[in-house]
Image: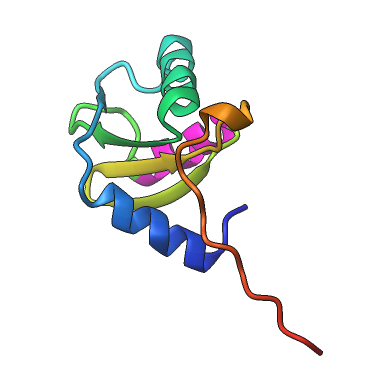
Amino acid sequence: MISTKQRAYLRSLVAQMVPIMQIGKNGITDNLIATLSDSLEAHELIKLTVLETCPVTPREASDALCEALSCDAVQTIGRKISLYRQASDPEKRKIVLPREKRSAK
């Protein structure tokens, strides 16, 4: 789970990105999930487009992909979805998320 501050940081990175894939009339398939998993492992942060012909809404697609890929939804705006998952190999990690300040109580 990413914090609000981390989500805001990821949103700033996603704003400059171009969608790498489209979800179309076939919806969310096993092949799509495998491809997205590989993309998340390589890039950590990806942006997708949900076409009008897709049988699910962008929000439903985002929720289903997050569950299937064990990733976090950064944002869903219109028909664009942004997903984040930290790379499993520490040497391949490209994105350093800001840390939360701990309050002294």
Residue 35 located within the stretch drawn in magenta: no
- The image quadrant that residue 68 belongs to is top right
Most common secondary structure along the magenta stretch: helix
Residue at coordinates 22% horizontally, 34% vertically from top-left?
Answer: 19
**Residue 14 falls left or right of residue 105:** left
The location of residue 11, given as percent across then percent down, is: 34, 56
The location of residue 3, given as percent across then percent down, is: 57, 63
Q: Is residue 4 above or below residue 94?
A: below
Residue at coordinates 29% horizontally, 48% vertically from top-left?
Answer: 14
- The image quadrant that residue 94 belongs to is top left
Q: Is residue 83 visible?
A: yes
Image quarter in which the C terminus is found: bottom right
The type of colouring in the image is rainbow
* Depth order, front residue of 40/92: 92
* Depth order, front residue of 55/68: 68
Q: In this view, does 15 lie above or below 30?
A: below
Q: In this view, does 43 lie above or below 10?
A: above
* Depth order, front residue of 29/5: 5
**Residue 16 falls left or right of residue 84:** left
Q: Is residue 68 visible?
A: no
Query: What residue occupies the far front of the structure in this picture?
Result: 91
Residue at coordinates 40% horizontally, 53% vertically from top-left?
Answer: 10
Residue 67 located within the stretch drawn in magenta: yes
**Chain part drawn in magenta:** 59-69
Residue at coordinates 31% horizontally, 16% vertically from top-left?
Answer: 26
